[in-house]
Image (tube, grey):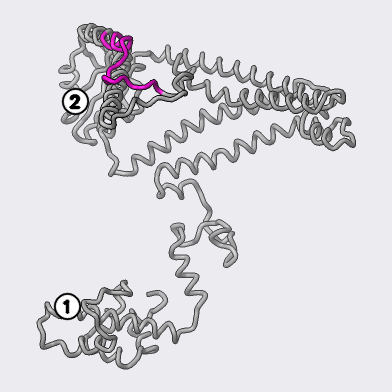
């Protein structure tokens, strides 16, 4: 319609009229403006007809029944519309401005109507500086995953820029040496490493340590920022509301075994209807046993399914050579049952879980309160922030309330761990990571120096130089990635 304005505007219809037969037909039916309302250029024909029949159907079909001619009238009207558009395209001159405006309509725009400031969208038709600047908030409309990824990419730019500036220190020191010679291979080797430096001092290790610490701090801060942005993006979409939006996480309850749910419900119902109150108990051992049992039961179901497939096909159980080295699971038994050792383990787990469930575990000081309305949850949250004092099970306590995270983000067995213990564990993990960073930096510096000395040794063979470069490179890569691999393991164990 942007390219054919005469189909929608009466003034341009008069200035640039269509062929007289089409105009008379449309004016007679009172469709001079409505002819451009259809977007389908190829409407389905009710029957095989000639193009000359379209005008006759519109003008001579008054004597027939309206329900019989509805489909034919629609086909005739759209056929005339298509012929009028084709006639106008043949008559009108091409307009690069109209084509550019039509193409820009499909591109992403800022709130002020400008295209975003990228060379791919603006050049060569216009200057990219005239476009709207791109910020991470632009990608919020594309979904939470894309928005978080683009924020991660934009956050990595200053981090790697700072790391590059720190790396300039040993590079500049390396250029002060005078060991470059006419040998091309040795020149390339020592010119891009520490081999050209006069002496190897602590400056090189300090630069590596600063870069590692910079990346570690950026990783922690970036994770917290992305988590906050994720919660903000999820809260903006009402279609994704869940029970977490109606649930409060309340801390500070008495750590006793006789704390009653009824007492808590009566207390929180003063702010609104309460759907459920879940009290966290110190059941970390029970949760671990239940998870182990579930894994065994899932494995048992998999064996039964595989045994049923074997019986249906009449083929032996699947097996492979990788079973010997642990690459594949062992072949299923014909009866689809667990091994004798796994069956004894399953019976032992059932008995231990049954005995633990008989015991009343003490409260961890945490409960989850789910309200029927968000308004009640917000009112309770503000009230507890102003007056956190309360008394349950005959003990005074100070409550600390906040909205509960999604259930998938809660490590239930860790709820019984106190704040002091968490801080001590976190400090211990950080100390271990710091020690590992120092060890990795020392290893990288030593093997780099060894590699350079071997490369400059004229008596060393080419094979020795290649092997030295290979294993030192492997040590450098392992020293770098081991920090990121072992950090989750430290957190899980400690």
Is the N terminus in the top left, top right, bottom left or bottom right quadrant?
A: bottom left
In the image, is residue 27 above or below residue 489? below
Examine the image and state in which quarter residue 281 appears. Answer: top left
Horizontal and vertical percent position of residue 466: 75, 28
In the image, is residue 27 above or below residue 373? below
What residue is shown with label 1? 70
Range drawn in magenta: 329-347
Examine the image and state in which quarter residue 102 appears. Answer: bottom left
Q: Earlier in the sequence, mark 1 or mark 2?
A: 1
Q: Residue at x 74, y 24 (%)?
A: 468
Q: Is residue 200 left or right of residue 88?
A: right
Question: Where residue 222 is drawn, which disc sits there?
Answer: none
Q: Residue at x 46, y 31 (%)?
A: 224
Examine the image and state in which quarter residue 201 appears. Answer: top right
Q: Is residue 386 visible?
A: no
What residue is shown with label 2? 276
Horizontal and vertical percent position of residue 269: 17, 26
In magenta stretch: residue 330: yes
Query: Which of the two marks, 1 or 2, is nearer to us in this view?
Result: 1
Horizontal and vertical percent position of residue 283: 29, 12
| Circle 1: element type | helix
């Amino acid at each position: 319609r942007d390219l054919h304005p005469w189909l929608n505007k009466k003034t341009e219809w008069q200035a640039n009229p269509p062929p007289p037969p089409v105009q008379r037909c449309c004016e007679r039916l009172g469709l001079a403006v409505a002819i451009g309302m259809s977007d389908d250029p190829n409407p389905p024909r009710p029957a095989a007809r000639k193009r000359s029949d379209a005008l006759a159907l519109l003008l001579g079909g008054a004597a027939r029944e309206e329900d019989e001619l509805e489909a034919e009238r629609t086909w005739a009207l759209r056929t005339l519309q298509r012929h009028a558009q084709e006639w106008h395209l043949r008559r009108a001159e091409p307009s690069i401005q109209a084509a550019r405006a039509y193409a820009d309509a499909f591109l992403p725009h800022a709130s002020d109507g400008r295209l975003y400031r990228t060379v791919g969208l603006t050049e060569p038709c216009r200057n990219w500086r005239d476009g709207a600047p791109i910020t991470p908030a632009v990608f919020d409309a594309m979904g939470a995953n894309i928005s978080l990824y683009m924020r991660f990419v934009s956050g990595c730019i200053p981090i790697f820029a700072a790391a590059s500036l720190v790396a300039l220190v040993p590079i500049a020191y390396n250029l002060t040496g005078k060991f470059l010679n006419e040998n091309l291979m040795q020149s390339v080797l020592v010119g891009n490493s520490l081999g050209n430096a006069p002496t190897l001092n602590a400056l090189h290790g300090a630069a590596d340590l600063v870069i590692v610490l910079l990346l570690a701090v950026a990783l922690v801060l970036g994770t917290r920022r992305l988590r906050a942005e994720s919660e903000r993006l999820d809260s903006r979409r009402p279609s994704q509301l869940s029970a977490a939006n109606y649930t409060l996480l309340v801390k500070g309850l008495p750590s006793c075994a006789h704390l009653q749910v009824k007492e808590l419900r009566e207390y929180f119902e003063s702010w609104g209807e309460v759907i459920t109150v879940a009290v966290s108990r110190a059941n970390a051992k029970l949760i671990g046993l239940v998870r182990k049992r579930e894994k065994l039961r899932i494995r048992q179901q998999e064996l039964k399914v595989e045994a049923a497939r074997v019986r249906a096909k009449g083929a032996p159980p699947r097996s492979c050579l990788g079973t010997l080295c642990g690459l594949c699971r062992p072949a299923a038994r014909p009866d689809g049952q667990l091994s004798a050792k796994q069956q004894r383990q399953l019976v032992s787990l059932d008995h231990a879980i049954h005995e633990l469930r008989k015991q009343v575990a003490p409260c961890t000081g945490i409960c989850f309160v789910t309200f029927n309305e968000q308004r009640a949850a917000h009112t309770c949250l503000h009230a507890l922030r102003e007056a956190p004092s309360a008394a349950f099970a005959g003990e005074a306590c100070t409550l600390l309330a906040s909205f509960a995270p999604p259930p998938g983000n809660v490590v239930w067995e860790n709820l019984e761990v106190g704040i002091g213990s968490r801080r001590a564990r976190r400090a211990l993990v950080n100390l271990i990571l710091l020690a590992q960073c120092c060890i990795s930096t020392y290893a990288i510096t030593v093997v780099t120096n060894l590699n350079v000395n071997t490369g400059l040794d004229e008596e060393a063979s080419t094979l020795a130089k290649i092997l030295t470069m290979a294993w030192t490179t492997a040590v450098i890569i392992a020293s770098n990635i081991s920090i990121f691999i072992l950090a989750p393991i430290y957190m899980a164990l400690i």
